[in-house]
Image: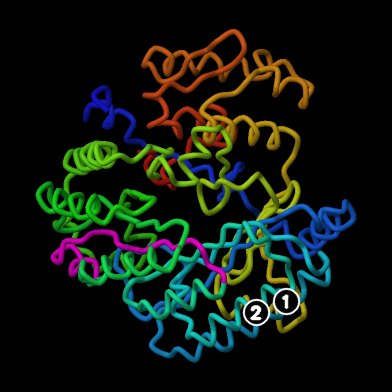
Amino acid sequence: MSAISPELLRRFDVPGPRYTSYPTADRFTDGFGERDYVKALERRRQRGNGETPLSLYVHIPFCASLCYYCACNKVITKHPERSDDYLRYLQAELDLHVAHGGSGQVVSQMHWGGGTPTFLSDAGLRQLMGMVRSRFTLVPAGEYSIEVDPRTVTPERLALLAELGSNRLSFGVQDFDPEVQKAVHRVQPAEQIFALVASARALGFASVNVDLIYGLPRQTAASLERTLAQVAQLRPDRIALYAYAHLPERFKPQRRIVAADLPAAPEKVAMLSRSMEAFMAAGYDYVGMDHFALPTDALAVAKREGRLHRNFQGYSTQPDCDLIALGVSAIGRVGATYSQNAKTLEAYYALLDQGRLPVVRGLHLNADDGLRRAVIMALMCQGALKFAEVDGPWGIDFRVYFASEMAQLHTLVDQGMVEVQEEGLQVTALGWFFVRGVAMVFDRYLHADRNVGRFSRII
């Protein structure tokens, strides 16, 4: 940490993709639709991939109240019965996947996100899990996670989640300071979160994550210091630390945030530096980007053993695999394709009423896309790549194919971020904190249009 000065953080405080995929989702087009997705599902079935474990993502868009910082696809409603209709449409979408991809496909990883998945009633949670289990085969040792709004659960509800098969929880904490919570319209007492995490541990959940955000309105160095101390006391298995990106012109809820209450850029960089220092001093391993984990957590173990992978939900311990995405706006990957569902409930429902899968955009990866995806994911997940392991499978000479990129790496080499060795590339310990910047060198689309302003900042 001593080498990561505020000056260095400021130098790399630039926009860039998160690389949950390559090419990134902004490259999807409406030229890819349901017919293309159905072909991808049927090709998977024909290849016999039904026995190859896949990942499932289910998007539940509903929230009972609005968090002002939020940039997620959500529907704010005080009517819990709206989820009943949504579950019926999810069932129709599941049935269409079974019709084209086959029943009983093996699932080793599942994530419920949102919105607020725990917006669903107990009966709704049971119904959703029953729908999934009746159509897929969930392996006993799989990773089954759910995002939890602490305001929507009790110890009894956590017990229900455990009973249904969830074994990982992610609590949306953001900040413990009451003034910051008021400024973002998300008030949740620290005592409530501590009690829920204690209940989760007593129930035997394998991993508990907390999401935090720095750069929020009314957040100060002093208030953040108190939050960091509380996080150290809470000691979750994993921590996800995100930067708040204030884009009120794109995300309407953020217009309720008073811009004058936001910390200035130098303060925000100092908050990141202090947070990273505090987590590592508390015994957390830096997994990558915005993720930290206790050394015993499966994510930290996967990082040490070179088994880290990355998908649309972020870093994962599961092997690279197809991802079936269900629900409004959900993004998936099958074979050499990416796909995204309709972004509004009206469009999502209308397509399913027609008996169609609700895919409205996506992408076929070409050979160059696949090659660069392999390179970028190796850097993002392992922090290294061997030229021979790319040359052979892809039929190229890495140094020749990526001659311009190798030239661009010289600046990062001089800054101590990357080492160019005889057999390959190695991201240094310092460079791992800025790995998105290293991966960006190999992003052909990014260099083609130079329009990086649409992305979050890389640190």
Q: Is residue 380 visible?
A: yes
Quarter in which the C terminus is drawn: top left
Q: How is the image coloured?
A: rainbow
Residue at point 65%, 33% (across, down): 374
Q: Position of residue 57 (x, y in %)?
A: 59, 63
Classify residue 259 as left or right of residue 173: left
Q: Are marks 2 and 1 in contact (CB under 8 Å)?
A: yes
Front-most of 432 and 440?
Answer: 432
Classify residue 144 as left or right of residue 170: right
Whether 45 is drawn above or below 453: the answer is below
Front-most of 299 and 330?
Answer: 299
Q: Is residue 362 visible?
A: no
Mark 2 crowdedness (10 Å alpha carbons): few <14, some 14-19, many ≥20: few
**Residue 183 on the magenta span:** yes
Residue that mark 1 sits on: 134
Residue that mark 2 sits on: 130
Residue at point 18%, 70% (across, down): 182
Q: Which label is found at residue 346?
A: none
Residue range (magenta) = 165-185
Residue at point 49%, 17% (across, down): 409
Q: Quick one: which residue is furthest to the top in this view? A: 422
